[in-house]
Image: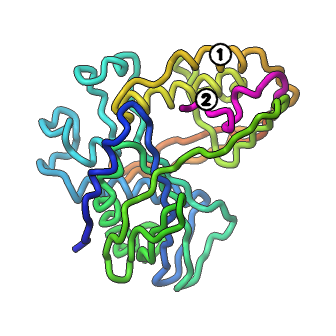
Amino acid sequence: MLVAESLPEIAGKSAGVLRVFPLQFSLETLAGFRAPEYTGASFRGGFGQFFRDLVCLTRQPLCRGCPHLASCPYSLVFEAPVLPERFAILRKYPNAPHPFVLAPQLTNQTWISARQILPLAITLIGHSVEYLPHLLRVFEAMGSSGRYGGRFRIGEVRSATTGGVVYDGLNRRILDQPAEFENKEKYDAPVHRLQLEFLTPLRMRTEGRYNSAPSFAEITQALLRGIHLLRELYGCGQGNTARTHPLLVCADNAVTEKSKFNIFHWDRMSGRQHRHINMDGVLGTMTVSGDLTALHPGSNWGT
């Protein structure tokens, strides 16, 4: 049994602000572990399947039409249902963004021996932090099953913000609340050049179609749209849309000096759908120039 204290208290503070809680999982292999090219894809598929098995009340094969859709932890965290009666902004979108980011360490290593550490970064957004105990149970179940590369266990979970231990895997006990990320970076110097590097496949839609050669303006627009939706859904209030327009103008006026993309063909196994899903995306780099100061994180445009 996991032991936790008052986790829901930290999610509801500062209404209107998008709160993020970055965590660093240390997964210890219990036997030889075969890592796929993108470990995150394997973990994500297993995460969804085990999460649903853990909390589903109806045991129906599909979530569509379920009377518990608006309150189910799995639905709210992993499927992120489109509920226009609660969020009018979603009427324009086929899917809602997920309130988490899962990022494994990038490595070319495909075989990992026993008693090694697999780092896994997970950032929880807004109220999804309330479901940390569920997430811990899900990863423990995944590791015990051995179906996602091999058997592993959670060694510990630390806050990526403070470095403090949040979860003791040996005793299966939550020791502390996840700490919220605070952007303390300040940058006053002008920014005239930015370079983007896509280390994992970028898969994005523009006007309903997958974009294999996105422009800087299209990438910026997609990022700002995603941030706005996350604030609406998980930030307990509206985002500051008044600051979005000048950022888009900044991106529109940027000059692309170099852009090189290559299509990367791959797929992943969906634990929920029990089939392979096409996840083709683009890898590459882009360099742009212009008056880009407003887009630098140190400008605090996201506040």
Q: Which residue is mark 2?
A: 301
Q: Residue furthest right?
A: 257
Residue 168 falls inside the magenta stretch? no
Q: Which residue is mark 1?
A: 246
Kindly identify the amino acid type of the residue bearing the numbered disc 2.
Trp
**What is the CA distance from the residue labelled 1 to the residue labelled 2?**
10 Å
- Going from the N terminus, do you reach mark 1 or mark 2 first? 1
Point out residue 57 in the picture as x, y percentages from the top left corner: 13, 50
Q: Is residue 261 above or below residue 90?
A: below
- How has the structure been colored for display? rainbow
Q: Which quarter shows the C terminus?
A: top right
- The answer to whether 115 appears left or right of 66 in the picture is right
Point out residue 167 in the picture as x, y percentages from the top left corner: 39, 71
Q: Residue at x 22, y 40 (%)?
A: 63
Point out residue 184 in the picture as x, y percentages from the top left corner: 62, 46
The magenta segment: 288-303
**Label ID, residue 294:** none
Q: Residue at x 48, y 26 (%)?
A: 228
Q: Which quarter shows the N terminus?
A: bottom left
Kindly identify the amino acid type of the residue bearing the numbered disc 1.
Pro
Point out residue 96 in the picture as x, y percentages from the top left corner: 38, 31
Q: Residue at x 56, y 81 (%)?
A: 116
The residue nearer to you, when weighing 20 against 185, is 185
Q: Secondary structure at mark 1?
A: helix
Please rate how many residues cluster around mark 1, counting C-alpha atoms within 10 Å: few if below 14, some from 14 to 19, many from 20.
few
- The answer to whether 126 appears left or right of 248 in the picture is left
The residue nearer to you, when weighing 95 against 3, is 3
